[in-house]
Amino acid sequence: MPTWRLQLESEDLFLNSKYYETLNNFLNNKELLELLNKNDYKLVFKPHAELMEYLDLLNVDNDVYISINESYQDLFNESAILITDYSSVFFDFAYLKKPVIYYQDNNDYHYDEGYFDYETMGFGEVISDENLLIEKIKFYLENNCQMEYKYKCNVENFFKFNDKKNCERVYNWILNN
C-alpha cells in the first residue's frame, strides 16, 4: 500500500520517476514471487487512489493481485504483513499487531517530517533496499508472520487502548458531550 507522490502530475513524470521504477521492480520481483508461492502466500497490491489513473502503465506480474474494490478492513483482516512507505494505513494494521515493513527507498516524499518518527516510533523496520526487503519478508514468513517483540512494544506504548471497546468509548463520549 504505497502512498502517492504529489509531484507526479503527468504520465511522463510518473513513467520517468524513481517511484515508478520502485513499484515496477517490486511488483515483478521474481525472487519475492517465488518465495510467496513456495509458502502459499499471495502479493496483494492496493494502489493509492491517485495511482489508479496510471495503473495500466505498470507492468504488474500476473501472480500479483491488484486490489481495487476490497475494503481496507477486509484487506487488513486477511493480510499477514503490510508493506508501505509512508501511508497512514500502518496505524490501523499495526493496531492488529501484525508485521509492518516501511519500504522507503526514495527520498521523494512530499510532506515535511511530522510527529511520527518511523525509526524510533515505528511498528516495523524501515528498509531502503529491495533485497533487504525480500529478506525481511522471508524472515516473517519463516516466523509465522508474527510481529517482532520490539514493535509489539511500540504498538502497546502508542495506542492507549487495545481492548476492542473504542466504539463504546466514542459513543459514551458523544452522549456526555
Image (spheres, rainbow, N blue to C red):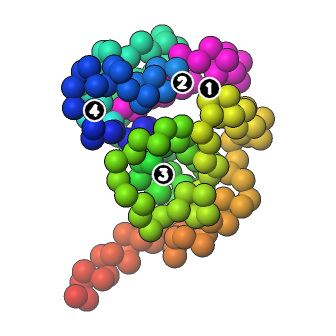
Spatial CA span between label 1 and label 2: 16 Å
Q: Earlier in the sequence, mark 2 or mark 3?
A: 2
Q: Residues within 10 Å of mark 3 (few under 14, many from 20)?
A: many
- Under tag 1, what secondary structure? loop
Q: Which residue is mark 4?
A: 8
Q: CA distance from mark 1 to mark 4?
A: 32 Å
- Segment tinted magenta in the rendering: 27-47
Is any part of residue 80 visible from this angle? no
Camera-nearest residue between 30 and 174 = 30
Q: Residue at x 33, y 19 (%)?
A: 15
Residue highlighted by disc 2: 26
Label 3 vs 1, first from the N-terminus: 1
Q: Is residue 31 above or below residue 86?
A: above
Callout in the foreground (2, 3):
2
Label 4, label 3: how far apart the Cα atoms are: 23 Å
Going from the N terminus, do you reach mark 1 or mark 4 first? 4
Q: Nearer the viewer, residue 47 or 95?
A: 47
What residue sits right under mark 1 in the picture?
A: 41
Q: How many marks?
A: 4
Q: Amino acid at mark 4?
A: Leu
The residues tagged by marks 3 and 1 sit, at their Cα atoms, a distance apart of: 20 Å
- At 58% from the left and 64% from the top, the residue drawn is 121
